[in-house]
Amino acid sequence: WIANWRAAFNDPNLPFYWVQIAPYGYANDRGETVALREAQQRATGEPHTGMVVTTDIGDNADIHPRNKRDVGHRLALLALRDTYGNRDVVASGPAFQSMRPGAAGEAIVEFAHADGLAHTSGPGGLSGFEVAGDDRRFHAVTSATIRGASVVLRCPEVAHPVAVRFNWARSPEANLANAQGLPAAPFRTDDWPAQTVSRDEQSFLAPLRDADSAFVDLFNGQDLAGWHIVNGDVSTWTVARDDDGPFIRCSGIPTGVMRTDRHEENFVLEMEYRHMVPGGNAGLFVWSDPLPVRGAPFTRSVEVQVMDGQEGNGFTSDGDIFPIWGATMTPVNGRGGSRAFPTERRSNPAPMWNHYRVECVDGAITLWLNGRVITRGHSISPRRGYICLESEGTEVHFRNIRIKRLPPASTGLTPDQIAELDRGFRPLYNGVDLDEWNATEEHEGHWTPRDWRLVFDGQGTDLWSKESFGDFEMICDWRWTDTPVETQRQVILPDGSVQTNEDGSQAMVAVMDAGDSGIYLRGSSKSQVNIWCWPIGSGEVYGYRTDAAMPPEVRAGVTPRVVADNPIGQWNRFHITMRGDRLTVVLNGQTVLEDALLPGVAAQGPIALQRHGNPIEFANIYVRPLD
């Protein structure tokens, strides 16, 4: 009905505010009252909606509360805050945030909007709280103690509480409120239909339960099965446990991602996260490619921001959504760019947990943060791909990650709407150390891991991989970091020979030169894919081109057919394929060598990054064995 009214008024953002049904002694109530209240609460997940709680002003003998003034005032507070944008207005009472076990059988319930949390009226302290253990039998608590923004519950009958309900009754009486006198709404932490609702109500809520049961876990609580570390170390992503259960610990070092092992198209994803450092940064990527883009540690995808305590004109810490590195999206509630901004601030600060629900359907994305829709985008491409968790400098935890897979688009997707598939590449650099390389004292201080970049100062010696490779594909990003100097360099002809002047001298041309380096293949400096600033461009195989004993067709074959280098200081990407004695080199998407013959090349051997006396940076080094 919300959608129908908005369609009738031609306003998709038309605000809707309603009043939760008040306490009343309904005759023949078989659970419908609590079911209706929960349905009203669930509906606040729609954007631009809100609900007034009236459990403190109802009359058990009168279905219509006589106190209309407070009802109207609370509705006005919602409008002032959410429709008119007065963020200083407190319009909500204490809202359930999380429940965790405490010491000696305690259950600790944390609330949002809980400044000045207090017991408002009635003898005997707070009422309405019940707890249950694994047997799913609820018992009224004997003690409910306010502690800051939390309530600590105790019940002798329940030694290990696993679920809490508050005012889960036909006619509850509220005596828990914040400093503004706004009452806490009824809530439950369980999804146990047999204990939560009557038989008739079970039928009423069956679609909700069936939908919930369709979720499957993406984190099994024991290990990282189903996940792949794309560009980080095993120390970056680990499984840990505290009193609340297992979680994925991300160290934040290096910057990079861990992705799922399968493409997803239409789905609902739920997860919880918490930052352990104020001002921390991380992210959730959806519809992602399997590998990072050139010159960055991130994949082409749509990012759901996971950030703490950072606010600016161009970003928030409350669930921004934006396309990154070649993905596209039309934002809802944008500010002139492609970033979608949240409609309200609902995130909890570090180290509190936050809950995300992300719905991705037919190229549209909707984000719920702590129970409310806040951010949306549509017309996304790609709209099928991997799901990633992001590491970005600070420790962050993830838990309760689950997915509900939905039917795919009925019309099918075009190729440009589908992310790339994993082809089996694995990293040779982890962003932390040189564990994949034969690093010695000669390399120390010269080849330096610096987050996602491997920085070389030009000194020391070549860096060889520990592993040997036969047939393989390799991806490697690189860029020059030295100041370029104008230098005279030879002009190389397409046949691999050096151009000469009329007097027989070598033809020279001035270029801006920042250095020389390369990648050695199969253990030999002769089979080197060159990196330099010469007019012929990078990608040639110097040892074969300059070998006069090689046939002309070999020398021509290892000479670049096109100059594909980016300007000095910008990142470049090699895609090198070695099959038998044949070499193909693609630089920045252009084929510079194709099926070039390397006579006598070794059948296998390690890979090396060359030292030639000039500083250079490498990144995103991946290899895929083909034999």
Image (cartoon, rainbow, N blue to C red):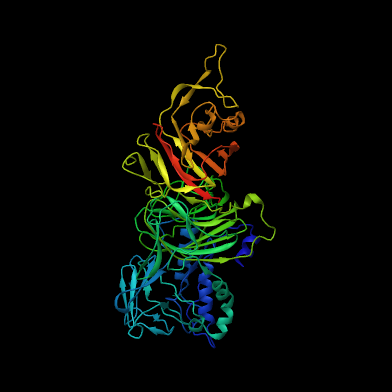
Which residue is painted at 63% across and 52% down in the image?
417
Can residue 181 be seen by looking at this rendering?
Answer: no
Can residue 71 be seen by looking at this rendering?
Answer: yes
Image coordinates of residue 145 in percent, x first then y, are 31, 75
Residue furthest right in the image: 411
Residue 428 relative to residue 539: left or right: left
Residue furthest top in the image: 503
State the residue in front, 105 or 296.
296
Residue 460, relative to residue 498: is it above or below? below
| Total marks placed | 0
Check the picture and name the quadrant holding the N terminus: bottom right
Which residue is painted at 45% across and 46% down in the image?
313
Residue 181 relative to residue 66: left or right: left
Image coordinates of residue 410 in percent, x first then y, are 69, 61
Residue 376, relative to residue 464: is it above or below? below
Quadrant of residue 307 within the rendered picture: bottom left
Image coordinates of residue 617 in percent, x first then y, are 42, 38
Quadrant of residue 205 within the rendered picture: bottom right
State the residue in front, 248 or 519.
519
Quadrant of residue 616 within the rendered picture: top left
Residue 596 relative to residue 87: left or right: right
Residue 375, relative to residue 493: is it above or below? below
Image coordinates of residue 378 in percent, x first then y, are 59, 54
State the residue in front, 534 or 126.
534
Residue 283, relative to residue 73: is it above or below? above
